[in-house]
Image (tube, rainbow, N blue to C red):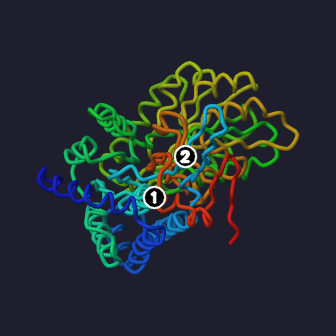
Amino acid sequence: MTTSPEELTRLTDAAAAAAPIWRTSSADDRARWLSAIADALDANADELVAIADRETRLGAVRLRGEVGRTTGQLRLFASVVREGSYLELTVDDADAAATPPRPELRRLLVGVGPVAVFSASNFPFAFSVCGGDTASALAAGNPVIVKAHSGHPELSERTAAIAIEALAATGAPDGSLALIEGREAGNALVQHPVIQAAGFTGSLSGGRALFDLASGRPDPIPFYGELGSVNPVVVTTDAAAARGDALASGLVGSFTLGAGQFCTKPGVVFIPRDTGIEQLVADAVAGTAGGPLLTDRITTAFPDGIRDLEADASVEVLAHGAETPDGARPVVLTTDAAAVAERAETLLAEVFGPVTLLVRYGDEAELLRALHAVPGSLTATLHSEAGEDVAEVLELLQLRAGRVLFAGWPTGVAVTWSQQHGGPWPATTSLHTSVGATAIRRFLRPVVFQDAPEALLPEPLRDASLARLPHRRNGVLQVPTA
């Protein structure tokens, strides 16, 4: 089903009418609207999980946890709105004695206007209709129009209906949230003059196409896309010797989690040559099973991606997991660092599903040459031991990822104030995060008021509000006590 041009016009008109109300809404109202969506989703979790499992086959346990993550991040953004530091309130008092004389300047961040959000396939709640992009855009004070993912249309429609009803019941304006369907409608949405920014999670090809549409508008808009990531892992010689078994089992658990359909899956792992890690990984993967992939397109692309990697002369199949009648079989491939340094475009292409590539290196120089070829990623992981000199390796990893791990595996993403879920191209199209409190920054723009009468200032910039909100005055940070 595709949303008609007439319906898209109706929805964008409603979003445009709602935008001034959201932009000037009080912190209490905005937080209450976000919390209402969270409460409504929790109240309908049983129904929503059943629909999601039918459409995605991700399993009730995983999906119920994802509902909790989704409502948790809605409530996190409610607290962000109430706390107020996201506004970046800044005041410079007038100074007639300055050279030249300085006017009074008061600055804050305001919502950009209606936002388009494109749902992801692999997180039908947390990166979908009421996921992080929607939550952060609403928190910033913007109406949202969501393009549903074709992999879970019934769930998208029901989730949107529940959220829209919750917003209406708590006094949010009509047009606060809407849902559209179909690729043509999505293309039209990102080009619509009412839309002022877009958030996307999905494939490199799909994201790049939308990015180009957003950039090619007569009035280009920011497009915050999360597109692809191989998430490199480096295992040092000392780490392999000290805890090879644990590293092997941890890797297998991470790259097979959710049938390898996490954007933070460790897709390429650099291991020291002749340390026994390969055999440990082979042994660990032998007892694992895959699972069904999310869509027909992903199901078809997975074996194609494996074949593309195997076509390189340096690549060998190390081990498979167990056969499953209706799922993708886990596979571990191997190559060497010299081949990666020469043919990174081929060997480091993301393959969505339960596969990882082990890259053998002989010494640090060989490892560093290969790491120079690694594309931007969401995460990078370093497994080393105390006393090892890993400074150059760490420098390269932090240049290539937005989150650097020193223990564990990257497939868990905490929804917190300090999280960074983004990285250099092609991981994302911007410097911002799509997870955590600072995701709100994507959908805000700065405005300065010069010598404005108190009555005409936005409420947060008035003296009474500044007395209770974090702000900077004449360069000095002011943190009101509770």
Q: Residues within 10 Å of mark 2 (few under 14, many from 20)?
A: some
In the rendered image, the residue lying farthest to the bottom is: 43
Do the numbered discs 1 and 2 sit on residues whose CB atoms are within 8 Å? no
Label 1 sits on residue: 458
Q: Nearer the viewer, residue 474 or 147?
A: 474
- To which quarter of the image does residue 397 belong? top right
Residue drawn at x 25%, y 40% as measured from the top left? 191
The image quadrant where one finds the C terminus is bottom right
Q: Residue 62: in sight, yes or no? A: no
Q: Is residue 422 above or below residue 139?
A: above
Mark 1 element type: loop
- Residue 32 versus residue 395 in the image, above or below: below
Answer with mark 1 or mark 2, whichever residue precedes in sequence.
2
Provide the secondary structure element on which disc 2 rests: strand
Residue 77: image location, x then y, percent: 51, 64
User: Which residue appears at 25% of the width and 47% of the height?
Assistant: 189
x and y, in percent, of residue 425 in the image: 49, 33
Q: Amino acid at mark 1?
A: Pro
Please state if 88 lies on the left or on the right of 43 as rendered: right
Which amino acid, by three-letter code, is at mark 2?
Answer: Leu
Query: Looking at the image, can residue 34 be seen?
Result: yes
- Specify whether 65 is left or right of 48: right
Q: How many marks?
A: 2
Residue 434 x/y as whole percent: 49, 50
Q: Depth check: 215 or 114 in front?
A: 114
For the residues labelled 1 and 2, the Cα–Cα distance comes to 13 Å
In this view, the residue farthest toward the right is 387
Which part of the image, by quadrant, shows the N terminus? bottom left
Residue 202 quadrant: top left
Picture coordinates of residue 473, whole percent (x, y): 65, 51
Crowdedness near tag 1: few (<14), some (14–19) or many (≥20) residues, C-alpha within 10 Å: some
Q: Which residue is mark 2?
A: 105
